[in-house]
């Protein structure tokens, strides 16, 4: 394989007994890029990461990380990656500095590099002045920044982040992503999973996982441009009634509630008038119908719908 790829996964598959947790997943990440793996609970994101980190052996397919085969060279891979696991562990009875020092020893950071490296990480994570604080006393966002610092103490060229921002407020999430950008700017390749669709915007490439399969793989703009049909935002009275009415229309591909607004996916722009008429003839007062660009969440919902419809058809045959 070319040296320019941080990750190459080919038909990567993991079964637990009869259950397939990851089903023939293929993708590539060029070096220095940020790849976002999105998907609901149980989609297979963590299992994919664990195979790529050399922790879990694939049942079928193959993968290379930084040029090394995950099935044969897990030790070489472990030396070259940082892994912030979903339930990352900091030592609560150690201070900020002691946690970093512990991981530095674990990863074999040379003694002479230790002090400057830890100082650099403390600065990066915005933890200066808190070195002596027990990590148990840190807020969620600070713990996450410290965990990231621990994961990169040995300057790995590849970083795996499994839901690094779960449960953190939006401002801190943005700050966390700025740190990720800085790392990518230094040439570090990143694979991050998230439930937050807005975070996908920070990624160069997005993979959407659903029920163990990769159902989309693209950059955010192409995903939006490739979305099927046209999306209208409908502001009307009785939105839940309207949702039921619209769902039954043959030309409506999908209806999703966004707060009190509805996002209605149809095949063509021309169907706006029909939407309006149908709602009015059902006694629903329409305030506004406007074409909007689909968000990544809209696209994900629509891809999942397609996937489910295909599955239903396949089950019937
Ligand atoms: N060791 C295991 N043995 C059996 N089943 C497992 C094992 N690990 C994971 N699974 C199952 O595989 C599926 C995928 O799990 P995985 O943890 O990869 O999902 P995920 O996308 O990371 O979900 P979440 O967003 O909740 O973290 C789930 O149904 C899970 O129960
Ligand atoms: Mg997971």
Image: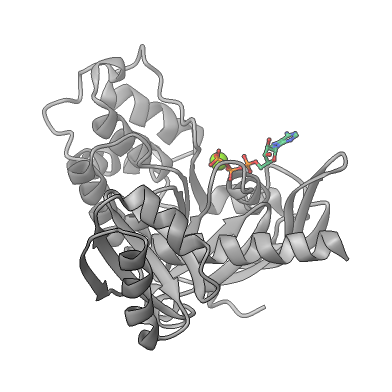
**Which of the 4 image quarters holds residue 201?**
bottom left
**Which of the 4 image quarters holds residue 56?**
top right
**Quadrant, the C terminus:** bottom right
Instruction: Work out whether 152 lies above or below 189.
Output: above
Question: In the image, what residue occupies the spot 25% across and 58% down?
Answer: 236
Instruction: Work out whether 111 lies above or below 313.
Output: above
Q: Residue furthest top?
A: 93
Residue 150 percent across, percent down from the top left: 38, 37
Question: In the image, what residue occupies the spot 36% across and 11% down?
Answer: 93
- Frontmost residue, 194 versus 62: 194
- Frontmost residue, 206 versus 270: 270
Residue 151 percent across, percent down from the top left: 42, 41
Q: Which of the colour schemes (rainbow, by chain, secondary structure, one colour) is used?
A: one colour
Question: In the image, what residue occupies the spot 40% across and 46% down?
Answer: 152
Specify the quarter for ligand 2.
Answer: top right
Label total for image? 0
Residue 285 appears left or right of 245:
left
Residue 114 appears left or right of 43:
left
Residue 100 percent across, percent down from the top left: 34, 31
Q: Is residue 190 visible?
A: no
**Quadrant, the N terminus:** bottom right
Q: Is residue 162 visible?
A: yes
- Frontmost residue, 31 versus 312: 312
């Amino acid at each position: 394989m070319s040296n320019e790829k941080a990750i190459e996964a080919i038909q990567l598959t993991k079964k637990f007994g009869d259950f397939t947790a990851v089903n023939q997943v293929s993708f590539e990440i060029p070096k220095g890029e940020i790849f976002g793996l999105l998907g609901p609970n149980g989609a297979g994101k963590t299992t994919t990461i664990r195979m790529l980190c050399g922790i879990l052996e694939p049942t079928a397919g193959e993968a290379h990380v930084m040029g090394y085969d995950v099935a044969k060279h897990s030790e070489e891979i472990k030396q070259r990656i940082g892994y912030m696991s979903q339930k990352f562990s900091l030592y609560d009875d150690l201070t900020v500095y002691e946690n970093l020092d512990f991981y530095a020893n674990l990863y074999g950071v040379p003694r002479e590099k230790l002090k400057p490296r830890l100082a650099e990480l403390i600065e990066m994570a915005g933890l200066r002045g808190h070195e002596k604080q027990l990590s148990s006393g840190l807020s969620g966002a600070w713990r996450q920044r410290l965990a990231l610092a621990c994961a990169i103490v040995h300057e790995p060229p590849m970083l795996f982040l499994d839901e690094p921002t779960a449960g953190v407020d939006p401002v801190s999430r943005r700050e966390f992503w700025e740190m990720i950008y800085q790392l990518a700017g230094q040439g570090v390749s990143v694979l991050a999973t998230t439930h937050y669709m807005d975070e996908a915007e920070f990624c160069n490439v997005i993979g959407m996982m659903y029920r163990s399969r990769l159902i989309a793989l693209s950059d955010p703009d192409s995903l939006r441009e490739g979305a099927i049909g046209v999306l209208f935002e409908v502001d009307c009275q009785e939105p839940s009634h309207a949702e039921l009415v619209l769902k039954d229309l043959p030309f409506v591909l999908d209806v999703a509630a966004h707060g009190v607004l509805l996002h209605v996916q149809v095949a063509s722009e021309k169907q706006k008038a029909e939407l309006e008429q149908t709602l009015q003839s059902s006694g629903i007062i329409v305030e506004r119908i406007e074409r909007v660009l689909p968000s990544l969440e809209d696209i994900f919902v629509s891809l999942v719908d397609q996937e489910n419809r295909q599955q239903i058809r396949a089950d019937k045959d």
